[in-house]
Image (tube, grey):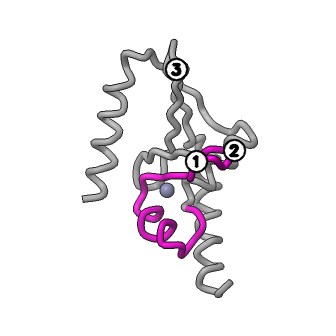
């Protein structure tokens, strides 16, 4: 691994630790369907993160780092994904319960936030 890449990975680890200590990994559960939505509150806003621990589905994060550096193969994961995996492994996340009726509004507001940072 190149020194630059090592430095970049160390930086991602550091940012992930900060997210974890702020309980920035959030699990939104919608009842009664039980639908789950994971978000990570980073230094630059909220991101939707999809991680399948069985590995059947590829991971996804809505951040720029993921789109530009993870999808291109430059790095293996963004700091949101690192934080999410650690939070799930150590139950270091907050859980918020919503009703199913709130799902659409929640997702709409979240996507608006996500896209405002991409454009
Ligand atoms: Zn990310």
Q: Nearer the viewer, mark 2 or mark 3?
A: 2
Residue 6 spot, x, y in % from top left: 65, 79
Residue 50 spot, x, y in % from top left: 53, 45
What residue is pinned by disc 1? Answer: 57
Query: Magenta residues?
Result: 51-77
Cα distance, mark 3 to mark 1? 25 Å
Q: What label does residue 32 carry, if any?
A: none
Mark 1 Cα-neighbour bin, 10 Å: few <14, some 14–19, many ≥20: few
What residue is pinned by disc 2? Answer: 54
Front position in the image: 19 or 115: 115
Cα distance, mark 1 to mark 2? 8 Å
Q: Nearer the viewer, mark 3 or mark 1?
A: 1
Q: Secondary structure at mark 2?
A: loop
- CB under 8 Å between callouts 1 and 2? yes
What residue is pinned by disc 3? Answer: 97
Q: Secondary structure at mark 1?
A: loop
């Amino acid at each position: 691994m190149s020194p630059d890449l090592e430095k970049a990975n160390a930086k991602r680890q550091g940012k992930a630790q900060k997210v974890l200590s702020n309980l920035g990994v959030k699990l939104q559960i919608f009842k009664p369907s039980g639908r789950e939505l994971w978000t990570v509150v980073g230094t630059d806003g909220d991101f939707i993160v999809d991680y399948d621990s069985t590995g059947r589905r590829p991971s996804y994060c809505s951040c720029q780092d993921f789109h530009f550096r993870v999808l291109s193969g430059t790095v293996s994961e963004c700091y949101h994904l690192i934080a999410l995996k650690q939070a799930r492994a150590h139950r270091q996340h907050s859980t918020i319960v919503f009703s199913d009726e709130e799902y659409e509004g929640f997702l709409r507001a979240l996507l608006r936030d996500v896209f405002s940072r991409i454009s």
